[in-house]
Amino acid sequence: MIGAVDIGGTKIAVGLVDDCGHMICRVEAPTEAERGYAAGLEKISGMLRDLLHRTGAALAGVGIGSTGMLDPIRGEFLDVDFLPGWEGKNPVEDLSLAFGVGAAIENDGDAGALAEAYWGAGKGKNRLVYVTIGTGIGGGIVLDGKLYRGVDGSHPEIGHHVLEASGPACTCGLSGCWEALAAGCSMEKWYAENLPGGRHQARAVTARGICELARTGKEFAKRAVEREGTYLGLGLANLIGMFVPDVIVLGGGMMQSADLYLDRIHQVIESGCRFVPAEKTAIVLASLGEHANLIGAATAWQHRYGHLAAS
Ligand SMILES: [Zn+2]
C-alpha cells in the first residue's frame, strides 16, 4: 500500500492507494499552514499512522503532491504563497525518516498527469498532456511513461503561455496568459466587468453560476461560455501544435461543465492546426474524479521508485 499525501492551501488529504491506482481509504484536515511546518508534518504523520492502524496495511512508500513551487529532486518546498514559512523544508526526508520507507514529491499538476497516464483516461497512450482548469490552469506532460521535467527538475507551467499580449495582467508577470483568460476566476472577472450594468450588481457570479445561467438561455452567460470555449480551444490548439500528443486529458472544476465548451473547443482546433495531424489528438475528460490528487501522489512515488511498467 502506498501512502498518499495531497497538500493544498486549505486542506491536506492523506490516503492509502494500492499498486494499481485504487483509492482504499482517505482522511482530510484543514492545512492551517500558519501553524508552521512542524505542526503540518505532525498532522500528516498522524493521519497516515491512523490509516495504517485502521487497515493493518504495510506501507511501501509515501508519495506527496503539492500545489506551488517545489524541488522534486531534493524534495523541498520552494517559495509557496499559501505555505508561509515552509520554504526549504523537506517533507520527503522527514516522512521517509518517520516511516522508514522511500518518499517522493511532485507538483500536483505533474502528479495528476502521472495518475491519468497510468490509471485514468490516458492509460496506454505514449504522449499525454494533462490540463487542469479550475481557479487557475495547470497540468503536466508524460512522454513514454516518464514525466517531462524542465531544467533542475522544474515544472513547466502550461497555463502561462500567452494567447493575447494585450490581455489581462497575469500573476506570473506577463499579460494575456491562458490562465489569465480562461481559468475559472478569469471567466468570473470578465463576466462581472462586461455584464451590461454588471458593475452595479452586488452579487458576484461564480463560473458554475454562469454556466447554469447559460443553460437557461441567458444571452450574456452564453457569450461568456462561448468566450471560455474559444480560449480553451486556442490554448489546446497551441498544445497540439507544440506536442501533437496522442491525448490531452482535461480535468479540474471547470470541466464539470465540459459539455458546454467541447463543441467550441473542437471548432477552434479544427479551424487551425493545419500543419499537424490534430485529428489524431484525442481530447478526453479526466476519469479519476475527486481522488485524482491522492492517486496522483501515490503514482508519483511509483514513478520515482520504478514501480510502474512503461505504458
Ligand atoms: Zn501567466
Image (cartoon, rainbow, N blue to C red):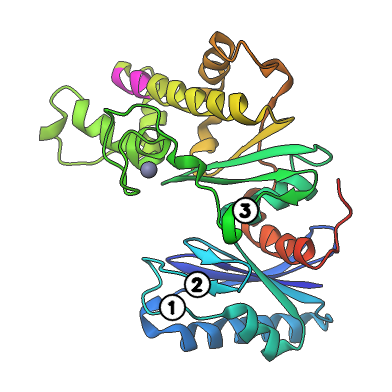
| Alpha-carbon span between mark 1 and mark 3 | 20 Å
Query: Front-most of 209 and 171?
Result: 171
Q: Quadrant of ligand 1?
A: top left
Do the CB atoms of the residues marked 1 and 2 lie less than 8 Å apart?
yes
Q: Which residue is mark 3?
A: 110
Provide residue 33's location: percent of width, then percent of height.
Answer: 41, 77
Identity, as a three-letter code, of the amino acid under mark 3: Asp
Outermost residue to the right = 309
Callout 2: helix, strand or loop? strand
Which image quadrant for residue 263? top right
Query: Front-most of 65 and 69?
Result: 69
Which image quadrant for residue 295? bottom right
| Alpha-carbon span between mark 1 and mark 2 | 6 Å
Residue drawn 41% across and 84% down? 36
Q: Which residue is mark 2?
A: 77
| Alpha-carbon span between mark 3 and mark 2 | 15 Å
Q: Write down the region rendered in magenta.
A: 220-224
In reply to whether residue 245 is colored magenta, the answer given is: no
Residue drawn 54% across and 74% down? 76
Provide residue 27's location: percent of width, then percent of height.
Answer: 61, 72
Identity, as a three-letter code, of the amino acid under mark 2: Phe
Relative to 154, residue 145 above or below: above
Callout 1: helix, strand or loop? loop
Left or right position of 45 against 89: right
Q: Earlier in the sequence, mark 3 or mark 2?
A: 2
Q: Residues within 10 Å of mark 3 (few under 14, many from 20)?
A: many
Q: Which residue is mark 1?
A: 86
Query: Front-most of 4 and 24?
Result: 4
Residue drawn 63% across and 41% down? 130
